[in-house]
Amino acid sequence: MKKVSIIILMLLLVLVSGCGIWTQREPDPAPQEPIVEEPKEDQIVEVTISSVGDIMAHMLQIQAAHNSGDNTYDFTNNYKYIKPYTQEADISIANLETTFGGTDRPYSGYPLFNTPDTLADALDYAGFNVVSTINNHTIDTGLSGMLRTLDVLHEKNLTPVGTRRNTDEESFVVKEANGVKVGITAYSYESPSSGGTKMLNGIPIPNGAEELLDTFNYATIDSDLEKMEQRINKMRQQGAEIIVFVIHWGNEYQRSYNDHQQNIAESLSDLGVDIIFGSHPHVIQPVEFIESQVTGKRTVVAYSLGNFISNQRYEFLNNRLTEDGLIVKVTYEKNMTTGEVTLNETSYIPTWVNRHVVSGKWVYEIIPVHQALENKEDFNLVTTDSINRAKISLENTVTWIEQHNQEIILDKEIK
């Protein structure tokens, strides 16, 4: 019995622990290398902001746009050659130096501008999306004309800056493009006041309308700069990462900026403004960079972009420079990981207004003058006079810009 008990015990031990005798043991897993995540590349986006000079509508331009067959006006041909360049920016700004006062009064040019509404269609066709409406001609057709101008622009989905219909609206915009928020605002100089009344071009600003127009006075510039600072802060509060000012200032037909322009530009730079696009002199003034000692940033300042389109011609003013304009393009990069926004590149396209006769009627065409001279027939440069004048325009513009700024790039790309 003792032997039997021992045998049974041995069999039980085999059954309990011996299963491994009959199966092969799995090998221990090999040690795994620790997983190291590759560093993620920063996502970089670009946003390009451009602006052009004064868009005017003298009476000869209005007549050139008139179709006597159906009594309509069409300005789109003015922009057909320049459209590929004005529409390529993410934000494209136009300076409208006229009003849409309607047909209750005659259409007119200088000195009191009233233009057919279809000019707004042409601006939309050209690819503009922001329009400055504040300048010395803003109230040429009175307060009603100013308000109607805003209505027309809103109907065409063009965003006005510088004026507003009521105090519930904003006269600036914070516009998002490619994930970057850009604050855009516009201001114009006032005429000297008369008996405490604010004036634009010698026209009194109607009582109660002062808050609808963004203006400043050289005589009270310190207090006006404080208001501009409040505007900057308000745009920042709404998320603006880039601040753009469109300013109507300076002396007409003067190629050099004056002390007021320089002082205001430096003050705005110290307040954190990134770009200043200037208008009013009707000729091109320098494009410079201001290195702010306060912000440590560079401000792009185009003191005057000249005339984008007008009838201010050599034949009438004995001044070729009023036929010239600039498209200035400023490109920023934003690091979407860190949120940092940096100035990348500033470039320019010289423009010239080619005025010529077709079937006995004047035609006005804005051309990118460098590109046009490379492909004359494609841009309707077909006469000896137009070719020579275009060459003079290009030389005048490039020489003047490069004399003051070697960093800004001449855009020669043909589109």
Image (spheres, rainbow, N blue to C red):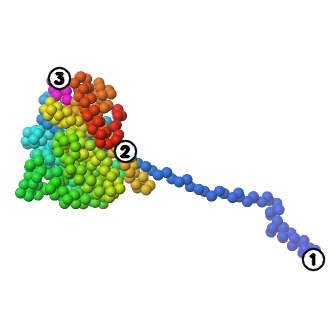
First of labels 2, 3 by sequence position: 2
Residue 173 visible at all: no
Toward the viewer: 153 or 234?
234
Residue 343, horizontal then vertical, whole percent: 37, 49
Q: Is residue 359 magenta?
A: yes
Residue 65, horizontal then vertical, whole percent: 17, 32
Does residue 69 lie above or below 45 as drawn?
above
Query: Mark 1 packing: few (<14 Cα in 10 Å), some, or many (20+)?
Result: few
Q: Residue furthest bottom?
A: 2
**Residue 367 figure quarter:** top left
Toward the viewer: 282 or 55?
282
The amino acid type, in three-letter code, at marker 1 is: Lys
Q: Is residue 249 magenta?
A: no
Q: Secondary structure at mark 2?
A: strand
Q: Secondary structure at mark 1?
A: helix
The amino acid type, in three-letter code, at marker 2 is: Glu
Q: To which residue does mark 2 refer?
A: 345
Q: Which quarter shows the N terminus?
A: bottom right
The amino acid type, in three-letter code, at marker 3 is: Ser
- In the image, is 200 to the left or to the right of 330? left
Q: Nearer the viewer, mark 1 or mark 3?
A: 3
Q: Nearer the viewer, mark 1 or mark 2?
A: 2
**Residue 268 figure quarter:** bottom left
> Residue at the spot x=27%, y=53% of the render?
266
First of labels 1, 2 by sequence position: 1
The region drawn magenta spans 355-362
- In the image, is 239 to the left or to the right of 29? left
Query: Mark 2 packing: few (<14 Cα in 10 Å), some, or many (20+)?
Result: some
The label shown at residue 359 is 3
What separation in Å lies between label 2 and label 3 (alpha carbons)?
Answer: 43 Å
